[in-house]
Image (cartoon, grey):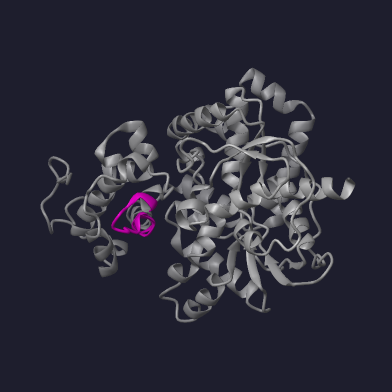
């Protein structure tokens, strides 16, 4: 059924506003025109399933973007409210029969909001500290993680949570803090291949992943080594830029992309490896992000051609399959950006099925978001928790002892979620299970 979506009541007529610069690209018009308003995206959209309102569905948001591009509405008020509620999970892209590139439209809309509704001075300072002075600075993030480790180990975390000492906003952020291990891997020199050397790969350690989930990186490196790869850690690598893009800070994302390209193209690597679905999706879209950059457009294409999610790479290059048994019932929680943006779906499952003794139980709705969505669970905690509750009900029905993830945000969200719901399940990254299997095989 085709839906006709009109501008909000009282909206200005066409031509009465100057459209935002980021929405005037003719290519965006072509993308919007591909949407036939069939509605097949509705059930795939987490926020539509929560609110059941047209403007909180993909086709409704496309109608809003179209109206803003025409100058019929502004990009503040209801426009910003409905776009801010979008998780950006891109499940609609998988469901769409017309191939609408919703992620590109959403990115342009967020840039328009950021350009036309400048943040307050306090918010600008917060953005500067978090996006420019913290996430791209590995030492600073590690220092923060070490402080949080002391906070956890001292018993102060228990007291703060029990006495509810933090205001709601900070309490929500603090609740996402995973159990921390701050014995960080040594990235100062390459990690040598184990056995026959099959090539050299660049490994992107990430920002939050490196500081707060360092065990995942350590396991990733060991698994790559066991399959014959010498693992390099480009010293000038930085944050992928996903977090700035989530809030429309395109210029900063472009700067970070340029730094990563420079860091990784100085050597002929077999692949550039990411172990976080959201980061990998951003890395693979550098060619789009830098398409108009005369110095980096071609180099961005060379970079993206080599980017692989670690599950994607290992599924094709598992030269030394794991042999140690893990007698567990597990369920796999897809990273939205790995599944819908990178289209990496079968590979993680193939790797799990390669572990002896493992029983993989699928979720009823494996394509639905967990509510993390980059910084969404911090910016929109109430909606994020509603989306998470739906995912947790699905997880609980599997009766799995282990929840497997492939993305930093999903990992932290699911740790928080299973604790909140009282589900007796461990949350691990896929590579951690592979690493255990290798260890068990060697110990047998």
Q: Quadrant of the N terminus?
A: top left
- Whether residue 49 sits left or right of residue 241 in the image: it is left
In the rendering, at what x and y percent does residue 274 appear? 62, 59
In the rendering, at what x and y percent does residue 429 appear? 66, 45
Most distant residue in the top direction: 163
Of 345 and 70, which appears nearest the observer? 345
In the rendering, at what x and y percent does residue 198 appear? 75, 72
Is residue 54 shown in magenta? no
Q: How many marks?
A: 0
Q: Is residue 141 visible?
A: no
- Whether residue 211 sits left or right of residue 408 in the image: it is right
Most distant residue in the front direction: 357
When the figure is inspected, residue 430 is found, relative to residue 115, above or below; the finding is above
When the figure is inspected, residue 287 is found, relative to residue 250, above or below; the finding is below
Magenta extent: 94-108
In the rendering, at what x and y percent does residue 353 appear? 65, 47
Of 293 and 106, which appears nearest the observer? 106
Residue at figure coordinates x 64%, y 70% from the top left: 271
């Amino acid at each position: 059924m085709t839906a006709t979506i009109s501008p909000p009541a009282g909206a200005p007529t066409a031509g009465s506003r100057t459209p935002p610069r980021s929405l005037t690209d003719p290519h965006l018009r072509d993308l919007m025109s591909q949407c036939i308003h069939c509605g097949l995206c509705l059930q795939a959209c987490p926020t539509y399933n929560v609110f059941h309102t047209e403007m909180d569905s993909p086709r409704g948001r496309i109608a809003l973007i179209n109206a803003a591009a025409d100058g019929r509405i502004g990009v503040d008020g209801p426009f910003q409210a409905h776009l801010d509620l979008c998780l950006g999970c891109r499940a609609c892209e998988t469901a769409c029969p017309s191939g609408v590139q919703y992620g590109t439209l959403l990115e342009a809309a967020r840039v328009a909001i950021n350009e036309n509704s400048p943040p307050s001075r306090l918010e600008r300072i917060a953005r500067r500290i978090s996006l420019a002075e913290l996430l791209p600075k590995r030492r600073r993030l590690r220092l923060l993680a070490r402080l949080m480790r002391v906070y956890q180990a001292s018993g102060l975390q228990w007291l703060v949570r029990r006495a509810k000492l933090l205001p709601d906003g900070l309490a929500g952020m603090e609740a996402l803090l995973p159990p921390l291990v701050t014995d960080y891997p040594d990235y100062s020199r390459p990690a040598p291949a184990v056995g026959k050397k099959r090539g050299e790969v660049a490994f992107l350690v990430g920002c939050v992943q490196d500081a707060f989930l360092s065990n995942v990186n350590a396991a990733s490196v060991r698994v790559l080594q066991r399959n014959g790869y010498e693992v390099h850690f480009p010293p000038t690598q930085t944050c992928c830029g996903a977090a700035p893009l989530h809030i429309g800070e395109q210029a900063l994302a472009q700067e970070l992309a340029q730094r990563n390209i420079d860091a990784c193209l100085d050597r002929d690597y077999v692949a550039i490896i990411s172990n976080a679905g959201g980061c990998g999706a951003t890395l693979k879209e550098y060619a789009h992000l830098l398409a108009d950059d005369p110095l980096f457009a071609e180099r961005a294409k060379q970079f993206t051609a080599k980017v692989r999610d670690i599950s994607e790479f290992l599924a094709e290059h598992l030269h030394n399959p794991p042999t140690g048994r893990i007698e567990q019932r597990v369920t796999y929680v897809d990273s939205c950006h790995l599944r819908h943006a990178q289209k990496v779906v079968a590979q993680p499952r193939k790797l799990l099925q390669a572990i002896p003794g493992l029983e993989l139980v699928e979720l009823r709705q494996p394509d639905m978001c967990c509510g993390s969505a980059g910084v969404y669970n911090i910016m929109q905690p109430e909606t994020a928790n509603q989306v998470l509750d739906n995912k947790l009900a699905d997880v609980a029905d599997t009766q799995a002892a282990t929840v497997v993830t492939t993305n930093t945000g999903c990992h932290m969200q699911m740790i928080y979620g299973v604790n909140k719901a009282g589900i007796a399940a461990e949350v691990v990254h896929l590579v951690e299970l592979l690493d255990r299997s290798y260890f068990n095989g060697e110990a047998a």
